[in-house]
Image (cartoon, helix red, strand yellow):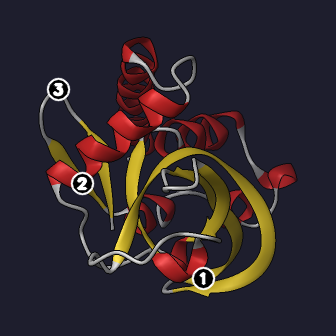
Amino acid sequence: MAWQGGSSRLQLVLPWKVLKRLPQQALQSQGGCSTQAESLLRGICTSVVVGVPQELVPNSAASHAPALVGLGIGYRYGRSYSLSFAQITLELTVVVPTSAGPKELSVQFSQLSDCEPSSADASNAWSDLTAALPLRFNDAALRVRRRNLKKAKETLRSLR
């Protein structure tokens, strides 16, 4: 499950439900990705906030939460894996704030945690990243994330 940023609240987004609406080729290789599908992938993958299981984050200190909060910053194509509706290679690139500093990693959509990050945890993650990487995570970046999400929603509507 993933969360999308809002002004003061977060809303649930199920990335695989969005991915299911895209052409199969866009989920398997960049060469099969149309401009519209690429725009949608970029919009969603640079806007979501997800739960990343702790075991996927190298050198992360153990915490009471089953998952760490990760902010989507993009996507890439990796090894093939199974998602509920297809074999895909698409991976979400996230940045996770840790006590050792921000960690960037690619995560398969099937590996995302089913545990929903709380609003407080998501807000704290943004604050931690703002402190660690102020040029990359600031108010302007938050506005861009919202704009990307809005464009992605518009693109999704056009696919109906």
Judging by the rendered image, the residue that carries numbered circle 3 is 7
Mark 2 packing: few (<14 Cα in 10 Å), some, or many (20+)? some
Q: Is residue 82 left or right of residue 43?
A: right
The first of marks 3 and 2 along the sequence is 3
Alpha-carbon distance for marks 1 and 2? 31 Å
Q: Is residue 68 left or right of residue 20?
A: left
Q: Position of residue 147 (x, y in %)?
A: 39, 21
Q: Camera-side residue: 28 or 149?
A: 149
Q: Position of residue 23 (x, y in %)?
A: 62, 59
Circle on res. 73: none
* 51 vs 95: above or below: below
Residue in view at x 24 percent, y 41 percent: 123
Question: Quadrant of residue 158 in the image?
Answer: top left
Q: Camera-side residue: 106 or 125?
A: 125
Q: Secondary structure at mark 1?
A: strand
| Residue type marked 3 | Ser
The first of marks 3 and 1 along the sequence is 3
Judging by the rendered image, the residue that carries numbered circle 2 is 121
Quadrant (top left, top right, bottom left, bottom right) of the N terminus:
bottom left
Residue in view at x 40 percent, y 47 percent: 48
Judging by the rendered image, the residue that carries numbered circle 1 is 86
Mark 3 vs mark 1, foreground winner is: 3
Q: Secondary structure at mark 3?
A: loop
Mark 3 vs mark 2, foreground winner is: 2
Question: Quadrant of residue 50 in the image?
Answer: bottom left
